[in-house]
Image: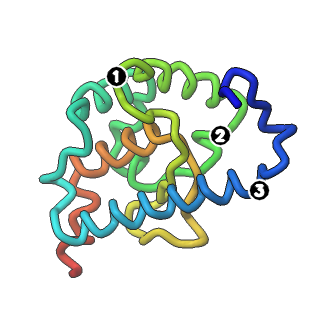
Amino acid sequence: MSLNTFNAEEADNLEDIERQFAVVAVEQAETYWNLLTKIKGSKLRLTKFDDDIYETFIKYFPEYQDVERVKNFKEDELKSKERKVKWREFCGEFEENVEDYNFGTLLRTNANDEYGQEGTIFVVRIQFYAFEIARNRAGLNDWICEKN
């Protein structure tokens, strides 16, 4: 079956597909967390496009220059009807350059918390990169390495 003819709504094994995406998202979150336990976030580069991702993030969402806003945000800031339009435009900026930019990924809504049932949301990878690059630049994830 080609992706051009695939219809997720009619797929027989949609639950299996969703479960596989969830497993990959959890594995990515665990890998990132383990990395943060060994290297201070402020010393970490997530992609070769970090500078471009950060500058574009701030261009589209200047409110996240405020460290407190990037540290702790509400899911609605990414998923409300109005914000989805702006986020789609932001995400589209990276379609050609950032591999798997639109893959599902887990993101902590509060940089002071670990991944968990509460305070973890499902986003596309470029949103994860935007927030985590901004957090790392502000030193908001350094506590993870210092704690371990």
Badge 2 marks a residue whose secondary structure is helix
Q: Assign the C terminus to one quadrant of the image.
A: bottom left
In three-dimensional space, the C-alpha distance between marks 1 and 3, rounded to whole angstroms, equals: 30 Å
**Between disc 2 and disc 3, whose residue precedes?**
3
Q: Position of residue 117 (x, y in %)?
A: 60, 71
Looking at the picture, tell me which residue is in the foreground, 42 or 38: 38
**Between disc 2 and disc 1, whose residue precedes?**
2
Q: Assign the N terminus to one quadrant of the image.
A: top right
Q: Which residue type does callout 1 highlight?
A: Asn
Looking at the picture, tell me which residue is in the foreground, 9 or 140: 9
Badge 3 marks a residue whose secondary structure is helix
Residue shown at 32% from the left, 30% from the top: 53
In three-dimensional space, the C-alpha distance between marks 2 and 3, rounded to whole angstroms, equals: 22 Å
- For residue 60, above or below residue 1: above
Q: Which residue is mark 3?
A: 15
Q: Which residue type does callout 3 highlight?
A: Glu
Query: Which label lies toward us, 2 or 3?
Result: 3
Question: Hey, which residue is sitting farthest bottom in the picture?
Answer: 148
Q: Seen in the image, is 32 located left or right of residue 48?
A: right
Query: Which of the 4 image quadrants contains residue 33?
Result: bottom left
- For residue 112, above or below residue 131: below
Crowding at label 3, few (<14), some or many (≥20) Cα neighbours within 10 Å? few
Crowding at label 2, few (<14), some or many (≥20) Cα neighbours within 10 Å? few
- Callout 2–callout 3 Cβ contact below 8 Å: no
Residue shown at 50% from the left, 50% from the top: 105
- Callout 1–callout 3 Cβ contact below 8 Å: no
Q: Which residue is mark 1?
A: 97
**Between disc 1 and disc 3, whose residue precedes?**
3
